[in-house]
Image (spheres, helix red, strand yellow):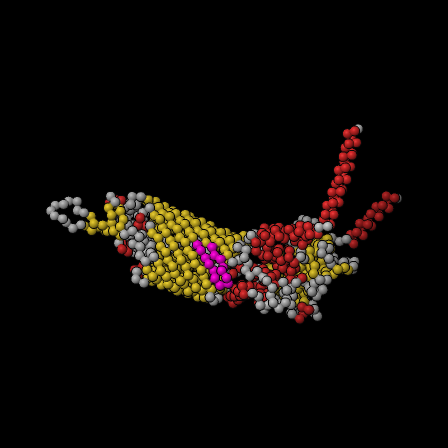
Amino acid sequence: MKFSRLTVGLSVWLMMAGVVYAQEAVMQIAVSPQLASEVRDQPLRDAEALMQAGKPAEAYALLEPLEFDRAGEARFDYLIGIAALDSGKPDKATLAFERVLAANPNHTAARMDMARAYYQLGDMVRAESEFRIILNQNPAEAAHATIQKYLDAIAARQDAQQTRVSAYIEGGFGHDTNVNNSTGESQIAIPFYSNVVASLNPTNIKTADNYYKAAAGGEVVHDLNADWGVYAGADISQRGDHTQTAFDALGLSARAGALYGADANRYRAGLSAGQYNFGKVRNRNTAGIDGEYRHIFSPGNQLNVFGQAMNYRYADPAMQMNDFDQKIIGTGWLHVFTDGRSSLTASVYHGTENDASSLVNPVTLVVGREDGDKRFNGVRLGGQTAYGDRTTLFAGAGAQASDYSKVNYYFLQQRSEKQYDLTLGSIWHWDKLWTLRPQLTYVRNDSNIVIYSYNRADVSLTLRRDFK
Amino acid sequence: MKNLTRVLFCLMVMLASHGIYADVAGHVQFVNGVVQLTTVAAQTRVLQKSDAVNEGDTLSSALAASAQIKMLDGGLISLRPDSRLKIDSYKFNGKQDGSEQGFFSLFKGGFRAVTGLIGQLNKNNYRIVTPAATIGIRGTDHETLVVAPGSVLAGLAPVGTYNKVNTGETSMTNDKGTISILPNQMGFVGAADQKPQLQPLNPNLFAVAAAPQARNAGAVRDSAVVDNSLEDVGTASGYTPPPNVGYSLRPITATFATPNPIVTAGPLPPIITVITF
């Protein structure tokens, strides 16, 4: 009995305490509109932070459940609009921007992103119309430049409709510390001859020179329908050395194939062929197939898988025992940062080169390549960022490890190599179609067989004119 | 007798309820300016955010007014300024069992429709009737406009019905024929006795936002992640062989002097041997 009285008493006390607490809480909320405002503001701040961190999909996922309640708030509507746009949902984005602009037609930021969304939806007519409205309002120079790029792209599409042609011509000069990709050693020990020292032919020793270069190329893409297209292109490049003319190079290449794209998936498959002259003499021919699949997770994130099979056939009879068939498969990732001014790429690949010659070396009696088949794995990283309105800085680096299948007759071991390369440069857009590109490249190949080890630095300046 | 009276009373209440409270079609997500809703009972009120919109209601927007209605099936209707749209029939029980239905009549102005589950499986269960043609869908985001004589839009384009597709596909049908409209195409029918046809998109007609009054542009995102679609990033993420991957371009040769192992008389000149690797 006492227990039940105690229980009832305790319950009443708890209820009263609860009521008082609840009242206090209500009063607390009632007297703190600032707190209520902050609570309401929190998802927007979180979403803005996610956008800053380059996570528009997460920002959209955070805001989308709130859309019915918060639609009509300009800050919310613009934020969910750009989160949708940057995460690959331009249709959703336009609905949000419609709200912003309905309430405030002077909201230039929403109009700009609305135009971007129309472009993404393929609605070039409305994209152009909205971009031109902003252009008439004298936007800042950076925005002006971006709008002009869009207008150029729209004009190119409208002019060409189903067929797009692009071409380029470029020329430049540079200095190469190793025009012949050769070792810096002039004398080498040959294990097969009990390490007797031999002198390498001067053409096989690292030689520096200045050079000029020129290149041109073009590509045509024809849309068969909304999903299918075909492409064809060709390039020619010439490099001439100042004194070491024996290493002058002329390259010709051509490609053609088909494209298929639907929704977030893109496919490309084609044939390619090339000719390479070395010192005014035909050095090798190449021919093969290549393909790529790309999945666009969002405008800022793309995955691709690629493969190619290429035959390399030497023209010089003395080199024909080096003929090989190369196969490469790999996958890559592209990430574009939220501001759209910087991007990173990464790819990994695996490849093989198989002997394709049945010729026998009369001295070593080795069939085909002296070092046999080759297996290699590599990784490449690249990045670029816009610096100011006219300059793009870029960098790329790669590492590749290769192992060969045969024991080398002269060096009594299987060839094994690691190659590293680094490229740094910038592109200065001094006109819409003219660019100037200073570039530095360094390549280092470490081989357990000394004649294949080399390093090379190349600095060049290239002037390019595009035709679109 | 009492029981019979109760049953009759309940039946009357149910019938009356059904007459007054038709099926809910959606709720107002956004409204800007004055948009009026007229019920089947001819009661008119100004639309407010979160209001329910029912089957049989007619929505009328003022000159600079617009609204977005979140539909029950997940679709969305975005009503344009100076428009009049009636929800003729709207039935959705959460299932795509053939009983779902969304029929609309557009008398004037326009609206954008992002379709939901209605019409996704059963295409014939979704349609928009206009004075000149009937619009059907095949899973879509599209915009329909009726340029009525004397309306503001009549100053921008000829009188008739226009249909512009954003995604998916629609059809325009009347007694004179049917056309299919694909993304970013615009269909037009001048009148019920004219054949539907495709026309170039009229950006003034389909402009969503009014022209800005401000002379100077405000701050904008100078660049955005989607701007990369302007550049060819195709090769950036692919495989590009490192420069000069070390293909053998020409034979590597070395020479060394082999001392003659048999010395007979006096020193002999060394034999020069050329090795090709």
User: Left or right of A278: which side holds A151?
Assistant: right
Q: Residue furthest top?
A: A1
B160 or A149: nearer the eye?
Answer: A149
> In this rendering, does residue B107 appear at all?
no
**Magenta-drawn stretch contains A391:** yes
Q: How many marks?
A: 0
Residue at 65%, 70% in the rendered image:
B156
| Image-quadrant location for residue B31 | bottom right
**Magenta-drawn stretch contains B267:** no
Residue A89, given in percent of the width and then of the height, sits at 59, 55
Residue A263, given in percent of the width and then of the height, sits at 55, 55
User: Left or right of A417: which side holds B140?
Assistant: right
User: Left or right of A301: which side holds A252?
Assistant: left
A24 or A433: nearer the eye?
Answer: A24
Q: Which contiguous range is marked in magenta?
A: A383-396
Residue at 67%, 54% in the rendered image:
A70
Tell me which secondary structure the magenta stretch mostly adopts. strand
Residue B191, given in percent of the width and then of the height, sits at 67, 67
User: Left or right of B119: which side holds A2?
Assistant: right
In the picture, the quarter occupied by the N terminus of chain B is top right
- In this rendering, the answer to whether B137 lies above or below A194 is below
A18 or A71: nearer the eye?
Answer: A18
Residue at 49%, 57% in the rendered image:
A385
- In this rendering, the answer to whether A115 lies above or below A349 is below
Q: Residue furthest right?
A: B1
Residue at 24%, 45% in the rendered image:
A193
| Image-quadrant location for residue A460 | bottom left
Residue A299, given in percent of the width and then of the height, sits at 54, 55
> In this rendering, does residue A205 appear at all?
yes
